[in-house]
Structure formats: structure tokens, C-alpha cells
């Protein structure tokens, strides 16, 4: 078996490329050396592994069977190497962050810029998902720090509020004018397209609760996957979007969007950093909880 290992390496490269010349270039050996190694392996196994075709070589039935096993073996070797390199990389400080794509763009970026300038040696990994998924990753010890919109119940975590945010409905003046012209006697909640985040999002759930409390039922809802898309769709006049006011302040000030009153006031919600209890004093996290 041991004497065949180098032969298997050559066999695998040839089977993967289907071309002796290309395998020779990849392995930095001559074509005759490739042919000799394959012939030697065929003799050892008492079979034929390749047959020639117009483009080079192709595996025989026995060759295909051996190739699949050799492929699995080299894949396992690769996994072993990666595991060792990963263990070595643990010596480098590593911070695993979780946040929604919206909070990454509008909130996290500025904090990260300051953090990196102070801690250039730290390797940072960021995963983007909803608040509830971020908390699940914290529970599973798959991230160290989350940036979330604070849910109603938050136990077992340390939370540091950063800023208050407030939801609002926005649209273009032209969209509202068109609705008025098309449906002069109908309320917007019956005629307009209301664009909102999907049902699993904490913002959507908060808005749903307020709509229900105020007995408002929207007739036409378009679910959108991200806050950025909601804002862009509103700006092109696709409908009325439920967005975070702080993220569209420039658009409101410049007149690209206007707020659409719904007959109630959205409460202020908290955005902040969260970690597992008693971990806020860890060196890698301390700066986020000052």
C-alpha cells in the first residue's frame, strides 16, 4: 500500500484532468513519468485504469471505481490539514460577530472601524441574520457578540443599548398623489401596496402588533427581504414602505420620501450589543460594552 501512495497521487491528477499532459503540468513531472506511474499501478492492481480518447484519456470501469475511493481519501487528507491549520489559527485573537445586514450597514460599520484601528491584530468574522437567529448563535457559542434590536424578552444575556430607533411608513409624494387620483374616496390601507419585512423579522412583528392594536388591516402587503430594498422600492414609487426613520432621514429631509401617517405613533425601540452574561468584561468584548 505505501509504495502505491505516490502512484495514487499521479492517478488522481490524471483521472481528474482526463489528460496526461495537463496532469504532468500540474505535478511538475514529465509525461513519460505520468505514463510509467499509471502503467506501474495497473500492473500492481492487475487491471486497466484508463483508455485513450480524442481528448486524452478516460477512466475504465475499474478506473472509475478506484478514482472515487482515491478522491475520498485525498478529501479526508485535506480536511485533516485544514483542522491542523485551524487549531494553529486559534492562537490569533478572533472575534465572531452577528447582526442583520441592515444593522451591519447602518450601525455596525462605524463601530467596527474604530475597533479595528485599536485592535488590528484581531481576526473578525461576521455573520448576517435576524435578531432571533443571532441570539440562537450566541446560545450555541457560534458567535461572541451580537448587534440586535432588543426583543421584548431578553434573559441570560448582557445588553448594552446604543441608540433608539423608530419605525415609520414612507412613500414618494407622487405615489400618494397617484393613489388619491385613482381612488379618491378610498383609504390608503385598502388601496395602496404596503411593503414590509417578512414575518420572521422582529421589526415586522412589532409593526404587526401595533397594527392589530389599532385595528388596522392592510389589504395589499408586499414582503421584502431587506431594509435597503424597502427603502429603494419606496423611492422608485412602488408603494408605501415600513422602514426605520433614522435610516431614511436624508431622504425625508431632501424630499425624496415623505412620511405617511397611520393614526398612531410608533414606540422607540432599542438597538444594542448583546453577549452572554458575564462575558462583557472579556478583553475582546470590553470595548463594545464601555
Image (cartoon, grey):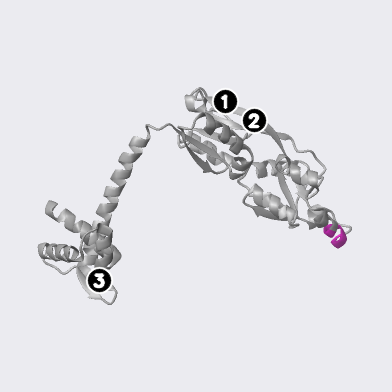
Foreground mark, 2 or 3, reads 3
Residue 35 or residue 225, whichever sits in front: 35
Helix, strand or loop status at disc 2: strand
Which residues fall within the magenta stretch?
A: 178-183
Q: Residue under circle 2?
A: 162
Q: Residue under circle 1?
A: 289
Q: Quadrant of the C terminus?
A: top right
Q: Is residue 181 magenta?
A: yes
- Estimate the x, y position of residue 88 in percent, counting from the top left: 33, 35
121 left or right, relative to 80: right
- Estimate the x, y position of residue 35 in percent, counting from the top left: 17, 66
113 left or right, relative to 50: right
Image quadrant of residue 11? bottom left
Image quadrant of residue 105? top right
Majority secondary structure in the magenta region: helix
Residue 220 or residue 8, whichever sits in front: 8
Mark linked to residue 57 = 3
Alpha carbon separation for disc pair 2 and 3:
63 Å
285 left or right, relative to 149: left
Alpha carbon separation for disc pair 3 and 1:
62 Å
Question: Going from the N terminus, do you reach mark 3 or mark 1 first?
Answer: 3
Q: Does the magenta stretch include residue 51?
A: no
Helix, strand or loop status at disc 1: helix
- Estimate the x, y position of residue 128 in percent, counting from the top left: 54, 44
Judge whether 144 appears above or below 39 on screen: above
Amino acid at each position: 500500500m505505501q509504495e502505491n501512495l505516490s502512484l495514487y497521487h499521479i492517478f488522481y491528477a490524471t483521472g481528474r484532468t482526463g489528460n496526461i499532459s495537463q496532469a504532468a503540468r500540474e505535478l511538475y513531472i514529465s509525461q513519460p513519468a505520468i505514463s510509467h506511474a499509471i502503467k506501474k499501478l495497473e500492473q500492481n492492481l492487475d487491471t486497466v485504469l484508463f483508455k485513450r480518447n480524442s481528448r486524452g484519456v478516460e477512466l475504465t470501469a475499474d478506473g472509475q471505481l478506484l478514482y472515487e475511493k482515491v478522491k475520498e481519501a485525498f478529501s479526508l487528507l485535506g480536511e485533516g490539514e485544514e483542522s491542523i491549520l485551524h487549531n494553529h489559527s486559534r492562537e490569533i485573537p478572533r472575534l465572531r460577530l452577528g447582526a442583520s445586514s441592515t444593522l451591519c450597514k447602518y450601525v455596525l460599520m462605524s463601530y467596527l472601524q474604530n475597533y479595528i484601528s485599536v485592535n488590528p491584530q484581531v481576526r473578525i468574522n461576521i455573520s448576517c441574520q435576524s435578531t432571533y437567529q443571532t441570539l440562537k448563535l450566541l446560545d450555541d457559542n457560534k458567535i461572541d457578540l451580537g448587534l440586535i434590536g432588543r426583543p421584548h424578552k431578553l434573559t441570560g444575556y448582557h445588553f448594552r443599548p446604543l441608540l433608539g430607533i423608530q419605525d415609520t411608513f414612507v412613500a414618494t409624494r407622487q405615489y400618494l398623489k397617484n393613489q388619491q387620483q385613482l381612488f379618491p374616496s378610498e383609504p390608503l390601507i385598502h388601496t395602496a401596496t404596503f411593503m414590509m419585512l417578512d414575518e420572521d423579522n422582529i421589526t415586522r412583528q412589532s409593526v404587526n402588533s401595533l397594527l392589530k392594536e389599532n385595528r388596522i388591516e392592510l389589504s395589499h402587503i408586499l414582503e421584502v427581504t431587506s431594509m435597503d430594498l424597502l427603502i429603494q422600492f419606496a423611492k422608485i414609487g412602488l408603494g408605501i414602505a415600513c422602514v426605520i426613520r433614522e435610516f431614511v432621514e436624508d431622504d425625508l429631509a431632501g424630499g425624496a420620501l415623505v412620511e405617511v401617517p397611520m393614526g398612531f405613533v410608533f414606540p422607540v425601540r432599542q438597538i444594542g450589543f448583546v453577549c452572554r452574561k458575564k462575558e462583557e468584561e472579556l478583553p475582546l468584548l470590553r470595548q463594545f460594552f464601555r
